[in-house]
Amino acid sequence: MSSTATVLDVQGLQTHFFTHGGVVKAVDGVDLRIEAGEVLGLVGESGSGKSITGFSILGLIDPPGRIVGGHIRYLDEELVGAPERRLQALRGKEIAMIFQDPMMTLNPVLRVDTQMVEAIHAHAKVGGKVSAQAARARARDALAMVGIPSPGERLKAYPHQLSGGMRQRVAIAIALLNRPKLLIADEPTTALDVTIQAQILYEVQKLCRETGTAMMWITHDLAVVSGLADRIAVMYAGRIVESGATADVIGHPSHPYTRGLIDSIPTRATHGTLLRQIPGMTPSLLNLPQGCAFRPRCGHASDACLAVPQAEPGPAGKTVRCWNMLTPEPA
Amino acid sequence: MTVDTLPSALLPPPETPWQRLRREFMADRLALFGLALLALALFAAVFAPWIAPQNPYDIGKLDIFDSKLPPGSRDAAGTMTYWLGTDGQARDLLSAILYGLRTSLLVGGVSVAAALAIGSAVGLAAAYFGGWIDALLMRIVDIQLSFPAILVALILLAILGKGVDKVILALVIVQWAYFARAARGAALVERAKEYIEAAQCMSLGWPRVLLRHMLPNCLPPLIVIATIDLAHAIALESTLSFLGVGVPVTEPSLGMLIANGYEFLLSGNYWISFFPGIALALAIVGINLVGDHLRDILNPRNAH
Amino acid sequence: MDTPVLEPASVSTTAPLLQLRGVSKRFVQDIDLAGRIANLLGAGHRASVVQAVAGVDLEIRPGEVIGVVGESGCGKSTLGRVIAGITPPTEGSVSFLGKPVDAMDAAERRAWGLGVQMIFQNPMASLNPRMRVMDIVGEAPVVHGLVKPSQEAEYVEGLMRQVGLDPGYAQRYPHQFSGGQRQRIGIARALALKPRLIVCDEAVAALDVSIQAQVLNLFLALRREFELTYLFISHNLGVVGHVSDRVVIMYLGRIVEVATTETIFSAPNHPYTQALLAELPRLDTTRRAYLPIQGELPSPLAPPPGCAFHPRCPHAMPRCRVEAPVLRTLQTGHTSACHLNDPAP
């Protein structure tokens, strides 16, 4: 973490979907910050709004959804309401995204080198065209950087000739080609095997350290992100319920949902015991409960929870949205 | 053990797939228009003997002096109006069209239903059992599909002779392979899904798995194909009748009516071909609109 | 912490419930007609053979939970299907309650068919979208005569309550339920046939963490209630460590290590098991440095010669490239297939 420039500053982001069934408040008041070179883990289950947050930052929300409120500042530039041309210039160059399915990035009918060179040319500086040779060389170096063996040969392959792990690495290489300052990764290793996932996590960690890229790692897997991220933000039903340094969020969770998530993880240590499960299911976003969205499932709920909790400073510098924050349990 | 939060009594009553289908179908005006046309055609076909002003095939009732009268003229006795005119044999065209619709829809409907049944059985069996059964059945289907439909129909009818039942048989033979191929495609997709494996795991026996589990899930694309194929079948039958090898003169279809009026087109008695042609076109348009909309509604729902 | 502790279910030491001996499963895709003609003209097409499972010996004892762990292409799902009777093995024998399947008469075969049930990974695809819950769960028991048609509704409602679903939902269709609820319907369906053994094929992989915890708790509770035996297939060693008494590690169709959960986690022998453990994402409060093993997962179409793991193994010896290791007993209940255990020249 060299400079303390804030790469991304999101305040009060609200993205709603106006469907036939009603308004789906997918993201309803999200605040987060990412500094240069930092990894932020955005953790949540399905329906929490974590992926929509990522898409909102890149301006990839299509109708019937739209950003209805809040600010997204990238290096002091406001992205909400920015013209599409500006967003296109940013995407792939300054802010890049990788998805769970690498085939969302890769075109199945084009060779890898074609796609990478295309990405380079699309963002080549005005007036300084990159020659085809130079572009290929950059592509080959990018593949080597993500740990792909024999990159020269892999350049000539089609996506379907590569394994799942390889494809994801190519997608990461494409994302990093133009040296973005911010990388948004949406569940990139969820569909991969454990040993391949470990390889990708290793490469990504190394890359971020070397290039100083800030990263937002969106996932449902607390264990994966705990080893990777500097800070963690936990999302539930469109809001961030707890955020702070990884050690503080995982070691001493303040929000009952975070506590519940941690208790739900099965390990060898929990063998033979019943996991302390969170009862019930996530609420439908069309029909959120009054006040705190977690209230119906929370063991610590009180009458105060009928009002939406605000983001308050909590213990150890964390930010927590809870009227009844958990006291740190003795170690 | 936790019971899921909201008690079932508070939730809205569940909607069956058929109810959802009906609701979505009603949403499109064009499809409703198509459905209206189709309903009209069916109504006319079923009730022709009662609503037609005249039975055009009762030779005794025809008066040769009434032939080739233009639309709107009255008959010699002054008792009724020929709204759409008469043809070369003094048949009231309106009545002839109503009876013709009857034959066309009957031939088309029955042949499509039979082709659907046979084709689905073949396609589902091929997909479920795989191996040599699949290879054998699909080669038969390929051979069948490699011949042009009209050619096969012509040859068959030349051998079998004239008659509504023979036309239906010929149409079934020509169409079943198309359904078999589509059914196999749909069945292969379903075959790969785990609920079929679950049924096998529960030792349910292949007849039950095919009929109770696979068939209902393969039906949507087949229904869509059937509605569109109905239009094809009617058109094909019309072509055959036009060529003179289709239905007999005593039970003409719309195609035969068009054929009969062909010779009069250039001499100015246009209505003899024209009005049956319009009726045929409207029936086919109605069927196609319904089929198109069915396809649209049934497709994206597969994403569930 | 007041986590409720389950008394361990009694694992009987009597005869095994199910036994596999030398079971292999090959999937062959023959060359089609065009390929055969091409071969006549000199092209060298070969039928593609996938050796999904190779030479598996396994014993499942009544009352135990045996976890099967491996990554893509290891054959664990195929193994599960062979055990459940959905796919017949190409070689080897499956024995249920001591009797080989091939030698069974109709009644015994039926007992096997009903006695082993399966719960699938995909909550949506594993339920017939056009059947109501009542029929999904109640069809098989009625067809097999376990329950009279007049008692079907009561039976199904009882099962639904047992898996934590409101019986009032019995007339609904699968798409009206959430993923976790659909898995519960799948569990109810499996339980309806009163099985002895349930094969769970990645049954919780597609669920959110909090729902996964509910379903895992449900599995354990049902195990005590119905005296069930589980074969728990998963790629997630953490989940397997929580739920299983014994663990089987598979790699490219072969079993490479078998031991109790305790042993696998504290003293893994096979290098692949060690790698899986080292790379298992753990909930840590400190940042970890990843040291993954290199190399891609091999394709089952072209398995490496000798020991299938040797291209990625940090301890590979020349012998590993040539000779495939066999499972050797290290101690009672702990077997491993690695040449490192075999000091013989």
Image: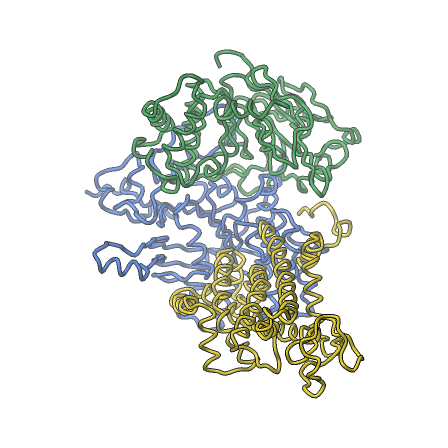
Residue at the location (39% across, 47% down)?
A: C73
Residue C157 in view in this figure: no
Residue at the location (72% across, 45% down)?
A: B5
Of B179 and A313, nearer the camera is: B179
x and y, in percent, of residue B82 in the image: 74, 74
Please identify the quarter of the rendering in which residue C34 is found: bottom left
Q: Is residue C87 left or right of residue A6?
A: left
Residue at the location (67% across, 73% down)?
A: B97
- Position above or below: A277 against C332: above
Residue at the extreme bottom:
B60
x and y, in percent, of residue C185 in the image: 62, 54
State the colouring used for the structure image: by chain
Residue at the location (68% across, 33% down)?
A: A16
Please identify the quarter of the rendering in which residue C207 is found: top right
Check the rendered structure and report the hue given to chain C: blue
Residue at the extreme front:
B267
Q: According to the colouring, which chain is yellow? A: B
Q: Is residue B257 left or right of residue B150?
A: right
x and y, in percent, of residue C240 in the image: 49, 43
Residue B304 in view in this figure: yes
Number of labelled discs?
0
x and y, in percent, of residue B172 in the image: 52, 73
Check the rendered structure and report the hue given to chain A: green
- Position above or below: C26 against A262: below
